[in-house]
Image: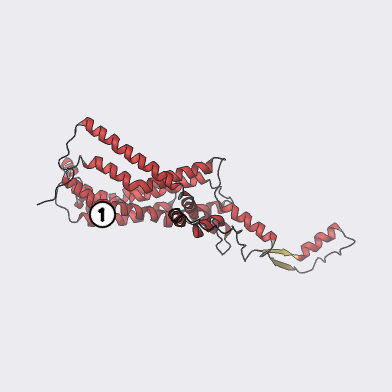
Amino acid sequence: MAEKDLFDDSTMTFGEHLEALRSHLWKAIIGWLIATVAAFWLSKPVIIEIQRPVIGAMETVFMQTGKKMEVVDPDIVQEVGNVGVIDKIKSWFSGEKPAEAVQPTPPAVDPNMQLEFDALDVLRSLHTSDPERYAAVPDDAPPAPVKISLVDTEFGKLISGIRYDSLRPRTDGVDEAFMIYLKVSLVVGFVLASPWIFYQLWCFVAAGLYPTERKYVYRFMPLSIGLFLVGGAFCFYVVIPYVLKFLFQFNVELQMRPEIKIGTWIMFALVVTLMFGLSFQLPLVMLVLDKIGLVPARLFREHRRWAILAIAFLSMVLTPADPVSMMAMMIPLLILYEFGILMCGRGSGKTSPFEIQSA
């Protein structure tokens, strides 16, 4: 005997549907707000992590010292590393006071940083300032290059600090840092509350679906979430760093230095990551179109050229206007397109409505 579904006997009027929608939305919003309050203790390391790609790209392109400097605020490194979120949560339940974070240390001076000059230029300057005290330098005197290491010197620490500060994104006003913290907390809160939010939406939608339709959702929802997470991670940790290096090279060629605004950068990173996550749903979209008989698997195989053209157009629209990010999205989508054909299988031989119309 087949197991009875929870929603098999659910019948509601239009007004009851609206009331159910209002109830589920309120429950989802309340869960989101509670998670957002909890996210205030998690947003700081998240904001630091979001800055890593742009700071790392600027360091690689503009500094070119041959040695990676620590690009995260040392105070935050100590807090996340020694007194992190997990330790704080444990201290709340145990009643013990968490260990104090180590005092921040200044950024390390690049060991290759040194001061180079010609000693003869110094002698010429001294002769010009006081000819009676300092003798003139012969015109045919060979150059006398001098190199002085700036390691463990106050001047070296000053230069290192200036270069370190120049890598970090900027804020436009006194309130922007707080607003960024609030926006990121909302996003982190939504991620934390997403299981509860999706459950409430599913309780409303599932009541209007047939058992076979709900079966497909149960089967393919985990795959959809997995593809979204893979697409977002691929974008943030692989695509964005290469795109930034490519774009920053134009600043080097034009002898410019970009002024990175934290608000603009976070929106750019979130939107591009979201677009990649959504684009990785392509195999599931193909499978749904095949299951409902709208576009059989046979058409996906026969019209690869048109599919390649459509994927190239979408990659151009959904990414910044540069060939690197476009190809970074286009190539995975082409692979996912072939994966979608494999998921559809040989097809059931159904006739597409497009084929009927063309006949």
Q: Quadrant of residue 164?
A: bottom right
Report the amino acid beneath label 1: Gly
> Is 275 drawn above or below residue 140 in the view shown?
above
Q: Residue at x 51, y 46 (%)?
A: 262
Question: In the rendering, at what x and y percent does residue 316 appear?
Answer: 39, 47
* Residue nearest the observer in this picture, 61 or 214: 214
Specify whether 246 is left or right of 146: left
Q: Which residue is mark 1?
A: 340
Q: Dividing the image into 4 quarters, which one contains the C terminus?
A: top left
The extreme front residue here reads: 95
Side (left or right) of 234 relative to 283? right
Q: Residue furthest left?
A: 1
Which x, y percent locates residue 4? 14, 47
Q: Is residue 320 visible?
A: no
Question: Which color scheme does this rendered protein use?
Answer: secondary structure
Secondary-structure class at tag 1? helix
- Residue 253 vs 66, above or below: the answer is above
